[in-house]
Image (spheres, rainbow, N blue to C red):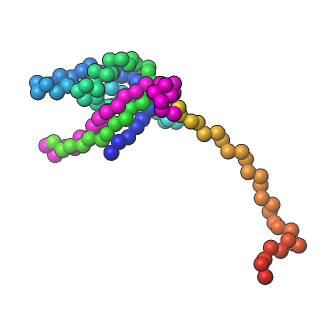
Amino acid sequence: MAFEVKGTLKKLFDQQDFPSGFYKRDFVITTMEQYPQDIKFSALKEKSEQLGQFSEGDVLNVKFDLRGREYNGQYYVDLNAWRIERGDQTAGAEAGQPAAVSAAPMPPVPPMPATAPADDDDLPF
């Protein structure tokens, strides 16, 4: 399952190195919704190195997968970021991708008459 979120980079954590040779880097994105949410993601291996080109305050578009596991009767969920891109519209247009399109509000609909005229009979029989 793949998901996507756009937001502002709020916090960039230091890289974590493990004895097995595995490494990851966590970061937090603040969403751009009516009620903004702070969401923590993990960038694994080579993707963690990619985070070095971003700084706090940058607008990012993050594509991610959900990862879940059980350990000692506890359940954990990770958000694994597999693509991290700048969130500005010009970057997508330069790469050959269409820029985001904003929807214009619809014009108001004229009100319907309360009752039809008495002489207007549209019955087919």
- Residue at 28% x, 26% y is 47
Q: Is residue 22 above or below residue 4?
A: above
Kindly give the residue lying farthest to the front in the view shown: 96
Q: Quadrant of the N terminus?
A: top left
Q: Please indicate whether residue 73 sits to the left or right of residue 33 in the image.
A: left
Q: Please indicate whether residue 27 sits to the left or right of residue 74 in the image.
A: right
Closer-to-camera residue (19/46):
46
Residue stretch rendered in magenta on the structure:
72-98
Q: Is residue 89 visible?
A: yes
Closer-to-camera residue (105/27):
105
Q: Image quadrant of residue 21? A: top left
Q: Is residue 112 above or below residue 96?
A: below
Residue 15 location in percent, x, y?
Answer: 24, 21
Residue 93 location in percent, x, y?
Answer: 50, 28
- Residue at 42% x, 30% y is 61
Residue 124 location in percent, x, y?
Answer: 77, 78
Residue 68 location in percent, x, y?
Answer: 24, 43
Magenta residue check for 106: no
Closer-to-camera residue (74/95):
95
Q: Tally the marks.
A: 0
